[in-house]
Image: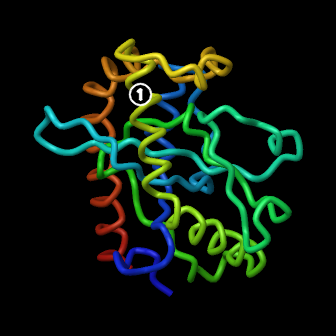
Amino acid sequence: MNLKNPNSNKSTLYVISDDYINKLKKVDYRVQNNYREQRLYFKSDLKILDRNEDINYYVPLASAKENQRSLTNKSVFKIYGDREEKDFLGVLHINNMIPVPKDCAKVWSPNSPSIDEKYKMLVIKQAKYLKSHEPEINESCKLLYNSKLGKLDPSYFKKNRKEVITYQKIMTNVESLEPVSIAESRKNTLVQTRSIDIE
């Protein structure tokens, strides 16, 4: 099963480095917990272009909570199954999307032996729904980002304004966070390689 296939009927989901998330949490308290790289993320089309490498914005996926059914705010995208609203599967917290360098994100694989079968089937259903709504999700990501930067102010984001990450603040720090994260990633890879050589 390959969620990375561009012709797939499922969106590709990602996991983000704990080190990077922990650094972002020091910059903005609204960055969501990563649960030891167990939280899944949707990769939006929104990216930073004025850099040597692309940095996409990733949206955290969360489990369904009953009190979220009635939400009308577009900063939270609701995910449904085959029975539409009767089959409430989870949410994307667009208000908590974060910029992530390529080296700090990796594709989530449903084929890991440590993944519970029930959970795997849930994520696959979520990924199918996200795939069919990617244009809508990406549009909300762009609107929310521009709204927070003061370029426009859609009324449907106002209710949740305080819970939206401050991108001007977080982006001034990502410049320094990214090189550190990449350096640590390369260091960890080197350590792993040496361990294999020793064994």
- Residue 134, percent across and down? 46, 57
Q: Count the labels in the image.
A: 1
Judge by depth and name the residue closer to the eye, 181 or 131: 131
Residue type, numbered disc 1: Tyr
Helix, strand or loop at disc 1? helix
Q: Classify residue 82 by image quadrant.
A: bottom right
Outermost residue toward the front in this view: 155
Task: Report crowding for label 1: few under 14, some 14 to 19, many 20 or more residues within 10 A (C-alpha).
Answer: many
Outermost residue toward the left in this view: 52
Outermost residue toward the right in this view: 66
Residue at the location (80% across, 59% down)?
Answer: 85
Specify the color scheme: rainbow
Image vertical order of residue 141 relative to residue 103, above or below: above
- Residue 182, percent across and down? 27, 44
Image vertical order of residue 13 relative to residue 70, above or below: below
Judge by depth and name the residue closer to the eye, 154 or 147: 154
Q: Classify residue 38 by image quadrant.
A: bottom right
Q: Which residue is mark 1?
A: 145
Residue at the location (29% across, 41% down)?
Answer: 47
Residue at the location (34% across, 16% down)?
Answer: 151
Judge by depth and name the residue closer to the eye, 178 or 45: 45
Residue at the location (45% across, 36% down)?
Answer: 98
Judged left or right of residue 184, residue 1 is right
- Residue 77, percent across and down? 63, 45
Judged left or right of residue 166, residue 159 is right
Image vertical order of residue 196 relative to residue 132, above or below: below
- Residue 128, percent across and down? 57, 72
Judged left or right of residue 160, residue 22 is left
Work out which quarter of the rendered image holds the C terminus and state it. Answer: bottom left
